[in-house]
Amino acid sequence: MVDGFDFRNPDYSSVFAQRADRLKKLRATPNSFSNLLAYYRNNPAQMIIDWGCTADPRNAERGLPVIVPFILFHKQVEWIDWAVDKWKNQTSAPTVKSRDMGLSWLSVALACVLSVTRDDLVIGFGSRKEEYVDKIGSPKSLFFKARMFMQLLPPELRGGYVQGVTDPHMRIKFPNTGSVLVGEAGDGIGRGDRASIYFVDESAFLERPQLVEASLSQTTNCRLDISTPNGLANPFAEKVRSGKFNTFTFHWRDDPRKDDEWYEKQKSILDPITVAQEIDIDFAASVDGVLIPSAWVQSAIDADKKLGVDATGERFAALDVADLGKDSNAITLRDGVIIEDVKDWHGKTVEDIYGTTQKAFGLCDEWGIDRLRYDSDGLGAGVRGDARVINIDRNYSGLGSIECEAFHGGASVVNPDKEYVKGRTNESFFDNLKAQSWWLLRDRFKITHEAVTDGKPFNVDDIIVIRKGMAQQNNLITELSQPTYKRSSRGKIQINKAPDGTKSPNLADSVMMAFAVTKKEGYSWSGFL
């Protein structure tokens, strides 16, 4: 990553000039390349930035060279560090991505750098078709990219690689280190050599993934699946959504080359399901009963700025409490109808509910608020007593107390006798307060989406805004589109927050509570209730 590099208006000529000058100086200095390779051994991203090239034929239409310096942006550097950490710790994990994020180039570049700086590695690449792994003359294939990456490096950094000599079909050898890249395809993925690292490209699209699961389990200690979503019925989706893996998410908003104008263009040329699935990373895009479609969530990002309204108001927080299991505690800062920030932390970091309450109070202080709503069902019930003890200490120390308000999702609905839709009261429409609150959150997103995309009239108190740029923005976006809904045998709305065994959407849960209107406040929300 080059600080200050303009990815939307790149000056590649100056980068090539700097590289040429650097290369000249290195060649005039004894032992410089051996020292440099030793440095790159522990800094693989830097080698790509310093010398790597990539190719994009679409550049020609923009008046740019097709072959350009591989300048990494922040998220790409972060992914390389993440992947190397997985290999060193002998763990496997998936990477879920929006389309066109450069992950194929990035994965082969990392594999090549590791192979020229480390001895005796075997790095595998697998995909559903052989032509996607290695087909001479096909830029689509992974090994075509690897050969091009290697050929465009200075000869001193190629590890003995010679194009057309050390790269037979489905293999690329590095004589100086003894390392090798190996390609496999289809049901044969994992049937060959044991591998130090194994990349599975577009893992969600494997034709018989269970066969690959079985074979790769004996092939490598570090399997890195990379894919865009392809529905829920595949092992890749199960891994990403299970909460059992340290999943890396590459969202299009992480790419400095892309902006809202780019996104709008994609929506104009692609069908809604493709946009939701392959761009917005919505696994449930084609699933019936998604509560809040991803397109609605995207419309809510900085919606107040898009609509030209002041959406600020009362500031308070909502806390979703978790235990020491796989779920995390999560808290939302609400400012009027704006989700200003969200944070989460695992229960192990605070030991118990008392520690969680202390953590939440500390965030309230950081945000300058004195009101906290918390989930009082289950484990969250303990917050009430812990908050009372903490508030006594706070008052003694002059900090002032935090007002705590319980949210009991299993309680009966608010305004049970009022019609929600013609002929259906709230009590007959919703199963409980939690279902009612989730549905009202859906309504907010729907109103916001229609106002932003169709120009429909709206009341500013009824919309919802996701503040762009928060650290957990992409995780929140994903979680908000996870819950599904169905009707009970009595016709009441029921919410399934974790379909198909996925992890609980803790961030989204805290947002739901932040926008739930409780009996204490009553309802004045444009007649919805």
Image (spheres, grey):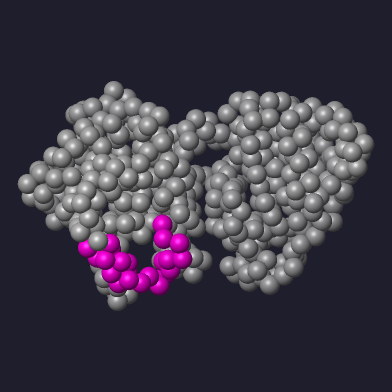
In which quadrant is the N terminus drawn? bottom left
Name the outermost residue toward the left: 165
* Image: 72 above or below 193: below
Tell me the residue at 42%/46% (across/down): 79
Name the outermost residue toward the right: 396
Q: Which of 370 and 97 lies nearest the eye of the viewer? A: 370
Q: Which of 152 and 193 lies nearest the eye of the viewer? A: 152
Tell me the residue at 35%/41% (across/down): 42
Q: Which quadrant holds residue 279?
A: bottom left
Q: In this view, does 217 lie to the left or right of 193?
A: right
Q: Which of 487 and 108 lies nearest the eye of the viewer? A: 108
* Image: 222 above or below 130: above
**Looking at the image, can residue 78 be seen?**
yes
Q: Does the magenta stretch include residue 291?
A: no
| Residue 123: percent from left, percent from top | 25, 36
Tell me the residue at 48%/56% (across/down): 254
Q: In this view, does 501 lie to the left or right of 451?
A: left
Q: Which quadrant holds residue 417?
A: top right
> How many tags in the picture?
0
- Magenta highlight range: 1-24
| Residue 157: percent from left, percent from top | 21, 50
Name the outermost residue toward the bottom: 63
| Residue 270: percent from left, percent from top | 41, 62
**Looking at the image, can residue 56 be seen?**
no
Tell me the residue at 69%/55% (across/down): 340
| Residue 70: percent from left, percent from top | 32, 59
* Image: 346 above or below 16: above
